[in-house]
Amino acid sequence: MLSRLPEEPAINARFHSEQGRIKIIHVGAGAAGLITAYKACKMLKDYELICYDKNSEVGGTWFENTSVCKKRARSRYPGVGCDVPSHSYTFGFEPNAEWDGFYANGDQIQKYFLDFCEKHNLRQFMRLETTVLGASWLDEEGEWPEIESINKYKGSLVHTAQWNSDINWHGKRVAVIGSGASGVQITPQLVEGAKSFTLFSRSGQWITPPAGMQDIRVIPDSEHSAHPAPAGKHFYTSQEKEVMRTDPERFLQYRKGVDSAMQASFPIFLRESPFHDWAMAMMRDMIKKRIGPGRPDLEELFIPTFSPGCRRNTFPNVYLSVAAPKFPNFYFIGGPTGNWAQGSVLATHEVQAEYALQCALKICSEDLHSLEPSQLVTSEYLDYVEAWHQSKSVWVEDCRSWVKWNGRVALWCGSMIHMLKTLRCPRWEDFVIRRRGGNMWSFLGDGRTEREVLHAEGQKVDLAPWMRNEDSAWTVDI
C-alpha cells in the first residue's frame, strides 16, 4: 500500500506574526471614517487605507448639515445640533475644552471633526467627492418613500439634510413633516415669524426635559458655574472653560460624571424598571403642564402611548453589529443591532473600528484569505437579540420607528457598556477562517519575534518584558 508523504512546510523568512501588506477601503469620511483612519495609524504597520466620501469635506452628516467648510459655502437648517451632551459627543481620548455649552450646535461639532482630522494628519487617507456606487460582494438598495401628489406642490420643498439658506419663511404658511430629532430641532425656529405652522407626525413624540446630568458642575458649589437649561441655552461660563483648558484631571472627572449619569439612565428603556415608570410619569406631567388645563384633546395628541425611547430599514443578517455571513472581510461601524439609543455613538464607533482593525491585523499577520462570521452563530445571536427585546425593552411596544422591521428591533440587546464589553476582542471561534494555502502555522516564521529582530538591528528593546516588580500586565508584542 502506497501513501503520499506530506510536504515539508516552508519556513518563511519572517518573524512571528509579521504583518503583510493589507488594503482597506472605508466608505464615508464622517466620524466612523475618521476614527478608522486614526486607529489604523496606531494598530497597523504596512497598510493602504482609502476613505471615500461623496462630499467635498470630511464630517459626514455634520458637514451636510452645517456651514463650516473649507471649499464651498454650506447652509444649515435652523437649530441643528446634537441631543447628546457635548462632552460625551467626543472620542473618549480626544476631549474638547472649547464647547460653548452643555449641548453643542452643528457648526461646533463639524469643527471638532475638522480639527481632529488636521491634528492627526488624516486627510492623507481621504478621497473626497467620490461616490461609491457598489462593490462585487455588496448589493444594497434604498429609496425614499413617495408622498402622493407631492410633485403638484407649488411651494418650497426642502429637506434638513439639504437646507436652502435662501428660504424666507417669515409671514408664510409653514409645514414640517416628521417629529424626529431634526423635526424637534427645527420646529421652534420655524414657528418664529411664520404666518401659520403645521406639524405632520405619524405619532406623538416624548420631549425630554433638561437632564439631571446638567446638575453636575465643572466647578461645584460655585457662582461661576452655569445653571441647567434646555439645549441652546445652557452655556459654560468663562471660569468653567478655563478649568477645562488648564486642569485635565478635573476636566476628566467632569466628563466622566456627565457620561456616567447618562449610562446610569439605561433602565429607562427596560419596561419593568421603576426608573422607566418614574421617567414616563414625569414627562407626561411636564407635557400636561405645557398644554394647560381643560384640553384633554391636546393631551391625547401630544402624549404618546408608547414608552420613552421606543421611537428612535431593513433588519439584515448581521453579527454583533459589526459583520455579516457571506460578506468576507467586510465590517460595519455603526451597523444594525448597534447602539443607536443610549449614550454617544462615538464611543461605540471607536470600539467597532478597533474590532474591524483587529480582524484586519489577524488577516495580514497570518496570511489569511478571509474572515466571516458563521451563519449558525449569527442566527443564534439574532434570536437572542429578539428574545431580549421581547422580554425587557421598550422598543417592542407599538410605535413606528426606523429601528424596527417587521416587528423586529435592530438595536443592541443591552446597555452601551454591555456592548463595549462584548466587542473589545473578537471571538475567533465564531468565524469561518479561510487560509491562502500552505501550512496553517507558517505565521510562526523563522523562530524569532519582532523584539529580537529589532535588537539584532541595534535598537534598544526590552528582551525580558515578563520581569517586573509587581503582577502588572505585560506583552511580548512591540
Image (cartoon, helix red, strand yellow):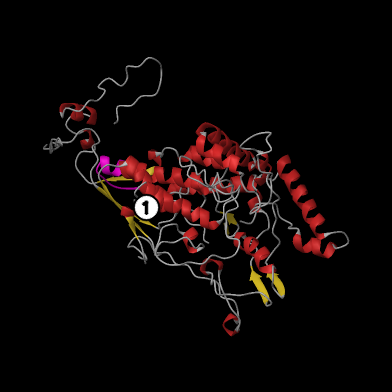
> Which residue ends up furthest to the top in the rendered image?
469
* Mark 1 lies on residue: 330
- Amino acid under disc 1: Phe
Q: Eyeballing the image, is 468 above or below 253? A: above
Residue placed at 59% from the left, 78% from the top?
156
Of residues 475 and 69, which is closer to you in this image? 69
* Magenta span of residues: 362-374
Of residues 449 and 65, which is closer to you in this image? 65
Residue placed at 69% from the left, 68% from the top?
191
- Magenta includes 369? yes
- Tell me, yes or no, if residue 399 can be seen here: yes
- Tell me, yes or no, if residue 50 can be seen here: no
- Magenta includes 352? no
| In-image side of 422 versus 398 (left or right) | left
Q: Position of residue 114 (x, y in %)?
A: 43, 53
Residue placed at 77% from the left, 48% from the top?
281
Residue 206: which quarter of the image? bottom right
